[in-house]
């Protein structure tokens, strides 16, 4: 009996030492991860053009002795870490692309990169925090590679390009990675991802089971009328008037037909193009916009009713109209069971009081495509300096993230992988 007690104490002490070793490695990597983040922030690259970004990521992963694959979905990087014991496969994902935004803050590592985007000269900026995502996952890979003895199974690190959407006429992002087999060989059992948030204080994590981010559908409406002189509208069919009636009518689908106590939904017309001159009623008009939904049934209903209403309104005023839809992202849906399974890990790493249930957002994320294939959980990591008087929204020139936010991201991703594989 005494022998068993001594043995138990020995292995308990060994496990505690091993755990302390892991935590020390996480703390000690902070200066390195900040340096990486600053490099990526100063050298941002647009979707499907992340060549230098991918090169730096791949070099680091190769130095860790991981199995590294480059050129996945054009510029993506994938690395595999096999633990010392057999088991399941978990994937950790980070997006790596920047945005066509000209930076307007005073950071010492501010981006000075300029380019031409869709015919317009613009700056390039990590205005959504993807630079932090890259650095966090690179650090997570380094930490886990030092602790293979704790891994029962395999970790797949996915550095995904073009989350903001590939250039017109190109494929890209999560959809192309899946098409090229990123979730196979070895087959992934679950996937985790995070997004930094400029409105949430450092040290906090927000999460939601089920739909946490919206499906994003782009639509284009073509309205056909009959051209005539502006002084004689009775001689033609006004596509601009029809467009106005369509815009007005579409909002009734949300306000009168959508069960908003279930989930939120949005229809927005963001662009309308028609006419050439003040005194000519034109032949046609075009409207472009977006639909955001968090429920598959609502998504299908809204598309069906838009098709019906657009055609009917145009006909009622003597014209014709058609609409086409393009899916940009699906619903970012956190698997119910997996969310419940990993919630204790989030609470362990951030502290119970710092893990907060959030409401869904009508923003979109192509991480959703991974979740359509395997169970996944996506959560938000606080990036705002505590006590800060002002935060700046994502996708804006003044966007800022506190470097100290990344340590919790590393700790959480590390423990998510270990806890999932060891359960």
Image (cartoon, grey):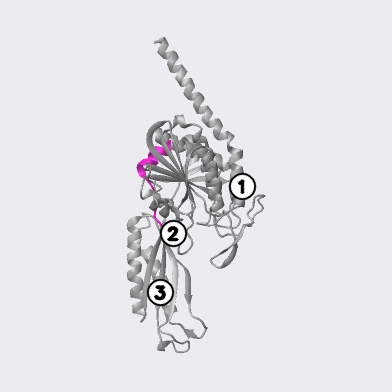
- Of mark 1 and mark 2, the one earlier in the sequence is 1
Place of residue 188 in the rendered image (x, y in percent of width and height, measured from the top left):
38, 43
Q: Using the rendered image of the protein, determine whether residue 237 is visible from the camera's viewpoint.
A: yes
- Of mark 3 and mark 1, the one earlier in the sequence is 1
Place of residue 189 in the rendered image (x, y in percent of width and height, measured from the top left):
37, 41
Residue furthest to the top: 2
**Residue depicted at 42% across the width and 75% down the height:** 243
The quadrant of the rendering that contains the C terminus is: top left
Q: Report the mark closest to the observer, 3 or 1.
A: 1
Q: Which residue is mark 1?
A: 38
Place of residue 182 in the rendered image (x, y in percent of width and height, measured from the top left):
41, 48
**Residue depicted at 39% across the width and 45% down the height:** 376
The answer to whether mark 3 and mark 1 are in CB contact below 8 A is no
Q: Quadrant of residue 290?
A: bottom left
Q: Which residue is mark 3?
A: 222
The quadrant of the rendering that contains the N terminus is: top left
Name the secondary structure under disc 2: loop
Q: Report the mark closest to the observer, 1 or 2.
A: 2
**Residue 99 versus residue 317 in the image, above or below:** above
- Of mark 3 and mark 2, the one earlier in the sequence is 2
Name the secondary structure under disc 3: strand
The answer to whether mark 1 and mark 2 are in CB contact below 8 A is no
Find the magenta span and give its range. 329-344
Q: Using the rendered image of the protein, determine whether residue 267 is visible from the camera's viewpoint.
A: no
Q: Which residue is mark 2?
A: 171
Near mark 3 (Cα within 10 A), the count class, few <14, some 14-19 or many ≥20, is some
**Residue depicted at 54% across the width and 34% down the height:** 26
What separation in Å lies between label 3 and label 2 (alpha carbons)?
Answer: 25 Å
């Amino acid at each position: 009996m005494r022998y068993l007690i001594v043995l138990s104490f020995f292995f308990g002490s060994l496990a505690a030492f091993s755990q302390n070793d892991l935590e020390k490695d996480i703390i000690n990597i902070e200066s390195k991860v900040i340096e990486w983040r600053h490099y990526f922030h100063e050298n941002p690259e647009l979707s499907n053009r992340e060549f230098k970004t991918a090169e730096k990521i791949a070099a680091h992963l190769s130095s860790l002795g991981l199995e590294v694959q480059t050129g996945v979905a054009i510029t993506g990087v994938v690395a595999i870490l096999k633990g010392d014991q057999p088991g399941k496969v978990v994937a950790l994902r980070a997006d790596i692309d920047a945005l066509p935004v000209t930076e307007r803050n005073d950071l010492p590592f501010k981006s000075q990169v300029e380019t031409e985007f869709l015919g317009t000269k613009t700056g390039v900026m990590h205005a959504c925090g993807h630079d932090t995502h890259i650095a966090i996952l690179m650090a997570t890979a380094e930490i886990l590679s030092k602790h293979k003895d704790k891994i029962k199974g395999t970790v797949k690190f996915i550095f995904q390009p073009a989350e903001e959407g590939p250039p017109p006429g190109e494929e890209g992002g999560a959809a192309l990675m899946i098409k090229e087999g990123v979730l196979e060989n070895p087959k992934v059992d679950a996937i985790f991802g995070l997004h930094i948030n400029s409105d949430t204080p450092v040290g906090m994590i927000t999460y939601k089971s089920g739909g946490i981010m919206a499906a994003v559908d782009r639509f284009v409406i073509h309205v056909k009328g009959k051209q005539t002189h502006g002084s004689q509208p009775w001689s033609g069919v006004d596509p601009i008037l029809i467009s106005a009636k369509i815009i007005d009518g579409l909002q009734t689908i949300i306000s009168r037909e959508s069960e908003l106590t279930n989930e939120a939904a949005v229809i927005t017309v963001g662009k309308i193009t028609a006419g050439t001159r003040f005194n000519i009623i034109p032949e046609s008009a075009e409207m472009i916009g977006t639909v955001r939904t968090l429920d598959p049934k609502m998504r299908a209903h809204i598309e069906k009713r838009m098709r019906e209403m657009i055609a009917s309104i145009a006909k009622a005023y003597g014209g014709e109209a058609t609409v086409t839809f393009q899916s940009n992202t699906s619903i970012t849906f956190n698997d119910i069971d997996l969310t419940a399974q990993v919630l204790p890990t989030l609470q362990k790493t951030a502290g119970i009081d710092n893990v907060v249930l959030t409401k869904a957002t009508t923003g979109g994320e192509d991480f959703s495509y991974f979740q359509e294939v395997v169970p996944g959980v996506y959560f938000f990591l606080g990036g705002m300096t505590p006590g800060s008087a002002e935060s700046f929204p994502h996708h804006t020139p003044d966007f800022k993230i506190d470097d100290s936010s990344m340590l919790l991201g590393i700790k959480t991703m590390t423990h998510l992988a270990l806890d999932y594989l060891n359960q």
